[in-house]
Amino acid sequence: MANHDIHFAVRRGTVHALVGENGAGKSTLMKILYGMQKPDEGTIAVDGEQVSFAGPADAIARGIGMVHQHFMLADNLTVLENTVLGAEALHGIGGQARKKIKELSDAYRLNVRPDVLVEDLGVADRQRVEILKVLYRGARTLILDEPTAVLVPQEVEALFDNLRDLKAEGLTVLFISHKLGEVLSVADDITVVRRGTTVASVKPEETNPKQLAELMVGSELPSPETRESTVTTARMLSVDKLRLSATDTDGAVRTVLDDIAFTIHKGEVLGVAGVEGNGQAELVEAVMGMREPDTGTVTLDGADITARSTRERREAGIGYIPEDRHRHGLLLEGTLWENRILGHVTETPNSKGQLLDLAGARADTARIVAEYDVRTPGIEVTAASLSGGNQQKLIVGREMSHNPKLLIAAHPTRGVDVGAQAQIWDQIREARRAGLAVLLISADLDELIGLSDTLRVMYRGRLVADADPATVTPEELGSAMTGAASGHLEHTEDAVEDAAPEGGESR
Amino acid sequence: MNKSVKNFDKDRLVLALGAPLLALVAALVITSAVIGVTGKDPLHAFYVMIDFGSKSDSQVWIINKAIPYYLAAMAVAIGFRMNLFNIGVDGQYRIAAFFAAVVGGSLTLPGFLQIPLVIIVAMVVGAVWSSIAGLLKVTRGIHEVVTTIMLNFIAASTIGYFLQDGRLAVKDGNLFHTPDIPASSHFFTIPTTPDPIDGTLILAVVTAVAFWFVLGRTRFGFDLRAVGRSETAASASGVSVKRMVVTSMVLSGTIAGLVGMPTLLNKSFNYGTDFPAGIGFTGIAIALLGRNHPIGMALGALLWGFLERTGTQLEFEGYAQEIVGVMQGVIVLCVVIAYEVVRRYGLRRQQRQVGEQLAAQARRSDTNKTKAGVSA
């Protein structure tokens, strides 16, 4: 992904946000700043001094640290051990290191306990450990890559308090996000990146989310809101008494899905909220037939599919947008048309009898590329060379091209730019109107609330709460996601009744 | 868009040809250095090899030698295409050839019945032997490298046990071998001068065509390649990875069963203690050399035959006999490294090109938009 003509300056002691749709070149830019990738031309200056980084070690030496979106922690080590790992030369691995960790933790109110095993920590705590790791190595500038993607609203607030503390101590934070509301609440300066170039630098007090979105895409901010209810009474997917246990890395058997039961009707979107790792991924895999549940039944359109294979389920009309498109949705080194065949090799236009129909698959790939606005110079390029958003559009196009009865959409718009997001939402809505049932898993609570007809909250492998998307707020969902609330979530403010016509009916 | 597609194709062709060329040049330079260190003239060595290798009797010898190598390479390549490392081709072809020889030597059916029978026995025995490794992998989680190596030893011992006078073999001078296959069941040869080419060449050609067709043009082949590229994505797409492991091991073993046929049906007509061993390992090198591609492996097998043929001549010219072994090793190493370098370079280059083209498109559409004064 080429970046060109990127200009921006970050003032010391500020939180600087870098916003842009995915594929806009934010990640590449970050990699360059952190020394993971070399720029073809252009300069980077730290404290007025021009630098060039041969690798992350150089960046760290210059006081630049990075907190990756995917945590890089060893679960089986303690916080202390994780922190000193690779930086043993700084303060040793014993008392001195512990003292330093304590100091940092107190100074920035990170509340880190050095002797707890990382595997016992929640997501927000892990993130604080990552921040601590970077500070421990002497960073004065922190790069945070989409830090809020994995947090519930309450945790986001706590993170922002931490960032403000860092700022108060004179540290600089570079904050990458595409959640505009968050950016506006925490940043001092905002730089907008679009299509590989910086298009604007704005102050949060001089702008609003709508304006920012327009800067990002040059079009209006889409809304996930579902306008009219299309829910019918015909059952499409019924899951009953589903239990699944899995053996974790220590050999201990854990129950990951416990007594799961729900029904999705034709034309209904069932949204499942939850902090990642509470069984959503396992639920999807159980419905897809990729995991064999201990007990329970899965019924699709009146037929018991509990014993069927993944391929038979796909043929029966389940479309699947996987959570991790690189692991489950694509052959990265395959061409686009090979990826169009993936998952539907037994169906037209990909094959005739036992033979592949290469011409048919190629032609249909070209159609998907055009219809779903996959930005690519051709269908012979590898999937790996497309940006995340365009990969996702290809997957959505592929799954929708087989007229699914049920669509399992796990984080369908994660890492997707605002324009593509709107498009994917539109496609889901349109198919829903035609009778599609959707199982929607998402970490984006606005998406869940806006798109779903029915909401369920998953916590530790159980569906613990349900809510009416017409009235529930992200904060209320957030408290159920952390286990603080359960049962039917009733909205407490009466005034919100007015908003009801916008949302779907809950049943 | 069409133009850019053509560009990508052209690039890919250049990259595809660039890698082996780079590897060969590197291999030539390194072997020249090695020969130079031994105090000999490398250029003369290459001259001797090319001169001797291009003689017509050498050509026939090389082709005949390449047939089993090619078959072995395809057996290995089936595994490689789905990330399975079948080191056991060696044991599979030997035990397959042994039992095929036993069946062939004990029957006197008409040739048109007996030859296919012998070949089918070999394929079935090879398949059964390799399926053990596949089944152990999916049921017990044992890595196929471990099981296939062990099965090689077991195959050798089993053959050793039966290859004794009074069991399944007869004594012939110092050697033991299975009873000879009757002349009516010898495979035909293709009359060429000065020596004939083994008719089993058609076995290799048919296998190669089937290999290409099944992998590239069938649903099954797509599933197999999908597993090789990403097990998780294949499983999510509906491929039963376990079943695919067993199936591909069986297929690999089936082709491995053919490896001994050129020797058995065109040359020795029995399985004796002097039956060639180690072809399975050569097949691994050739599969690497030919990048699991039917044409690449054919060229690789011929190159291997060429090196072996001309190596003997180098000895007469006073060069060290081991120099051919060094060359073979260096070539494989160079090829593996060159392909990886070129692959990574190609991937990065393509990503950059896609990025550049899209950025250019975006800039164009941005300017158009501003001109028209429309915000889409």
Image (cartoon, helix red, strand yellow):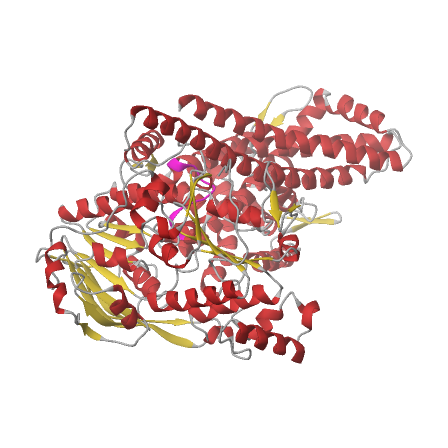
Left or right of A406? Residue A414 is: right
Q: Which residue is depicted at the point 46% across and 76% down? A: A120
Q: For residue A338, which quarter of the picture?
A: top left
Give the quarter of the figure containing the C terminus of chain A: bottom left
Q: Which residue is depicted at the point 31% across and 58% down? A: A444
Residue stretch in magenta: A328-337
Q: For residue A341, which quarter of the picture?
A: top left
Q: Is residue B112 visible?
A: no
Q: Position of residue B187 (x, y in %)?
A: 55, 32
Q: Where is residue A107 in the image (x, y as percent from the top left)?
A: 54, 73
Q: For residue A418, which quarter of the picture?
A: top left
Q: Position of residue A445 (x, y in %)?
A: 28, 60
Left or right of A114? Residue B44 is: right
Q: Which residue lies furthest to the left in this view?
A: A233
Would you place residue B362 above or below residue A88 in this image? above
Q: Position of residue B69 (x, y in %)?
A: 62, 38
Q: Residue furthest front?
A: A206
Tell which of A266 and A170 is nearer to you: A170
Tell which of A264 and A450 is nearer to you: A450
Tell which of B77 and A208 is nearer to you: A208
Tell which of B234 and A110 is nearer to you: A110
Would you place residue B9 above or below residue A456 in this image? above
Q: How many marks?
A: 0
Q: Does the magenta stretch include residue B221?
A: no
Q: Is residue B53 visible?
A: yes
Q: Which residue is depicted at the point 31% across and 37% down? A: A350
Magenta-drawn stretch, dominant element (helix, strand or loop) = loop
